[in-house]
Image: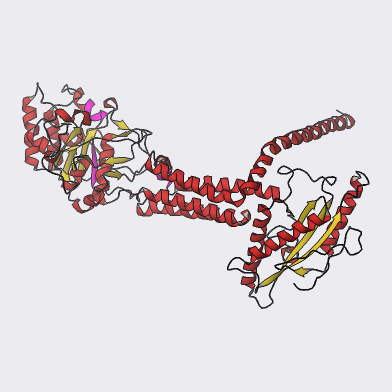
Amino acid sequence: MSGKIRNWLAGIVDSAMAGASVRFMDAWAVVERGYRRPLAWCSQRLGFTFYPLLALVMVGALAWDWQHGRSLDDAEDAVFDRVISWRPIEPLPSGRTVVVEIDDCSIEHYRARGEGGWPWSRERHADLIDALDRAGVSAVGIDVLFADPSRDDPGGDALLEATADAGGGRFIFAATRLHPDFDHAAGLHAGEVPGAFRLDPGATMPGPGVAMIQPFGTAMARHSGLVNIRRASDGVLRDVRLYEVAGGWAMPSLALRLARAGGADARVAVAARDGNLRINWRGRSRLPYASAADLIEGSPVCGKALPSLEGALAVVGHTAAGINDAKPTPVDMAMPGVEILAEAVEALSTGSWIRMPPGWLKYALATLLVLLSCFVFWRGEPHRDVDPVFVALNLALLAIAFAGLTLFGWFIDIFASLGYGALCFGLCRGYAAVQRGRATGNVDYLPAYDPATDPWLLLARLRFEPDPGLPRRLARRRWREYRRILRKLVHSSSHIVMIEGVIERKHWMQAILDDLVLLTWKGAAEAGVREQAGRDLDALHAALNATSERLDGSGRIMVCTATARIDDGSGNDPHARRLRLRALLGQDLDQLEHWPLAAGNPLLPPIDGSKENQPCATPSAP
């Protein structure tokens, strides 16, 4: 392809892209104005009242949620799952809690010997407990429910019951609490449940009836604990229930009784006050495992090295795939139930559970963030200053949350609160953008200037002059307050339009050009424009002296104004109007004569009666 043809094709593509871009931007501008101008109309009527109203609505929503669904708790659970899996360090097992698994290998070993598969005989369970006892374990929890006597093996039942009786409370068996709907026909009472303790000092014996399935033997039932679980609304198991409550009585879980049997009374008493134990879940450093067949046979039948069992707390349960006792947790969507119980025992015996602050804390933090965001924007703080503060605050709170969970075992739920605070901040930020867009004259927010309708323009240039004796830091603070109050006045006014962006904050020439603040007023008559500008400048002076950061005594605002008729009525000549506006801007920017902003700001009439481009004068002191 020749260069001439290539250039011709490139020209066609460039022309098509340019035309499409213009058409799209014009069409998109119509869309933006369709919602931005109504928003600007609303902002002019609400003004800065929007921010306290928003705070009232969002705090009210938090109060309603606290009394009803508590959706922040659901958000907390989802965030907890991410944080627990993302943390760089997780706690190592103490080695004191061991999972004794009835795994596929153990079941297959006895099936291959012709001694039957699952379920095992009661005698084999008794042999396993005896093997653990001889290995020197401190206590054993059996996560297998022996609800009924065996019709085929009464001798095995008797052996298992004798083992439970001989253990003297060191062997804890599984029991389960039925739904309260069955309590009316129960013969067992809450105060009579093995290991039950009073939550309410006024709870009386024997307490209400409770429906439970206990082990069939007397000794086994006396040394039993509940293995009920409660999943969250999303189906994930994050907390292990330490006890079930009925009539002011707490009926303990197997994990709680096993930990107490291992001597963890002091730590367990503290954890048991709220009833839910948040496990310090670990995905990379699992608890030590031992195969049941290896222990019963006394040899490595399944080829696994036995962990140290001396003084250990052993939790026995099945992990074989066909038995299906897996539950979803934050670190494993199919964690064996026996490992979950073992994790609870590990947490209770070592004091390593996740501490959770009171539920109201996240609501208090969310309320604080909402009030802080609304207050900052209500004050009229510039978004360029607010944004980095908001980001820094979020990063600091995130760092605290990760450090607390990783190093100290405290999960401080700031994430849901930060999300709610970010929603409020975004609403404030969006409303402030609407205010700023109208105040700076963006035609997406207000109609374009029409010189034929409002031929007169008045421009005022403002410059802050600190007192010579004012310390530099204090002078900077006064200058910032002046800009904040000026911005709030302009954003609240329906008359003033600020010409902003001549010099940006932190610009490399800011020290020289930071006094370029131009305000404009428009109107059909010169007198009306001057009157409105005078009222607004008077209001600015009053606002600058209404706080403890008073202008008077620390500096002054030097004002210079110029007025011109942009449309002289001779026709619609855009070139002539542009020349008049350029002359007006140049005069206002170059004018040296000015006066200090005061309680009354007389704007002088034209000097020579031409009503165009008159210089600013310095009136006598008011």
Of residues 54 and 534, the one nearer the viewer is 534
- Determine if residue 546 is in view: yes
Of residues 403 and 268, the one nearer the viewer is 268
Residue for point 85% across, 45% down = 452
Question: Of all residues shown, which one is farthest toward the bottom?
Answer: 469
> Looking at the picture, how far across and down is residue 459, in whole percent?
79, 58
Q: Is residue 222 above or below residue 186?
A: below
> Looking at the picture, how far across and down is residue 104, in whole percent?
26, 28
Q: Is residue 510 left or right of residue 205?
A: right
Quarter of the image with the N terminus is top right
Q: Is residue 96 magenta?
A: yes
> Looking at the picture, how far across and down is residue 235, in whole percent?
36, 33
Q: Is residue 280 above or below residue 611?
A: above
Residue for point 71% across, 57% down = 504
Q: Is residue 123 magenta?
A: no
Question: Of all residues shown, which one is farthest toward the right?
Answer: 570
- Determine if residue 413 is in view: no
Q: Quadrant of residue 237?
A: top left
How many numbered discs, if any? Answer: 0
Quarter of the image with the C terminus is bottom right
Q: Is residue 149 left or right of residue 347?
A: left
The magenta segment: 82-107
Q: Is residue 458 above or below residue 39?
A: below
Of residues 78 and 61, the one nearer the viewer is 61
Q: Is residue 337 left or right of residue 149?
A: right
Asked which colour scheme the image uses, the reply is secondary structure
